[in-house]
Image (cartoon, helix red, strand yellow):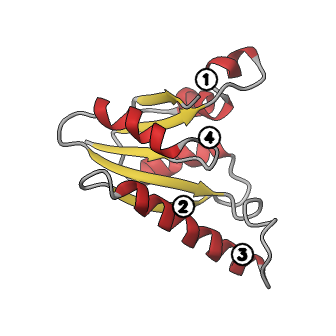
Amino acid sequence: MRVVAFVDEHDDQSLFLQRVVPVLPAGAQLHLVHVVNPMVDAADRFALSNAEALAGLIAEWRSRLDALAAGVPGATTAVENLQRGEDIGPGLLRVAADADASLIALGTRRAGTMRGMILGSVADAVMRGARIPVLVVNIE
């Protein structure tokens, strides 16, 4: 079983892993992924070009994910880009499908709407569109 766990910059990433890893089936392969929006995430970084800013951001996330994965035997990591105009929910689903995931894990925090208070807008979008099981972990 391949588990794609999406790591968000706002989550407590070590708490996320502490809650996800114990519930994974024996022999599950954990793949930690951070998804970057190239048009937004690198915009506030100082660099000569957006491509250079994005490269720096991706390198930072690779390092962060590799450090997290070091505590989980066999875990792999990746930093993926959203496609132009792609929303985060459908982007996460595409990345999970591309990785041939059997399970999606993601963290959530409380948001402003009633439904968002329970799941969060990204988690809600992933759960509505997923064709595979989704493990939602509260990171508060």
Asked if disc 3 and disc 4 are in contact, CB closer than 8 Å, the reply is no
Disc 3 from disc 2: Cα separation? 15 Å
Disc 2 from disc 1: Cα separation? 23 Å
Identify the residue under disc 3: 53
Disc 4 from disc 2: Cα separation? 13 Å
- Between 11 and 106, the one lying in front of the other is 11
Identify the residue under disc 1: 119
Disc 3 from disc 1: Cα separation? 32 Å
Q: Quadrant of residue 11?
A: top right
> Dot 2: within a 10 Å radius of its alpha carbon, few (fewer than 14), some, or many (20 or more) residues?
some
Q: Quadrant of residue 133?
A: top left
Q: Earlier in the sequence, mark 3 or mark 1?
A: 3
Q: Earlier in the sequence, mark 2 or mark 1?
A: 2
Q: Inspect the image, locate mark 2, and give the three-letter code of the amino acid beneath it.
A: Glu
Find residue 89 and name its label: 4
Q: Quadrant of the N terminus?
A: top left
Identify the residue under disc 2: 80
- Depth check, mark 3 against mark 2: the one in front is 3
Counting the numbered discs, the total is: 4
Disc 1 from disc 4: Cα separation? 13 Å
Q: Quadrant of the C terminus?
A: top right
Above or below residue 41? Residue 136 is: above
Q: Inspect the image, locate mark 3, and give the three-letter code of the amino acid beneath it.
A: Ala
Query: Which residue shows up at 74% across the image and 66% down it?
Result: 42
SS at badge 3: helix
Query: Which residue shows up at 32% across the image and 52% down it?
Result: 71
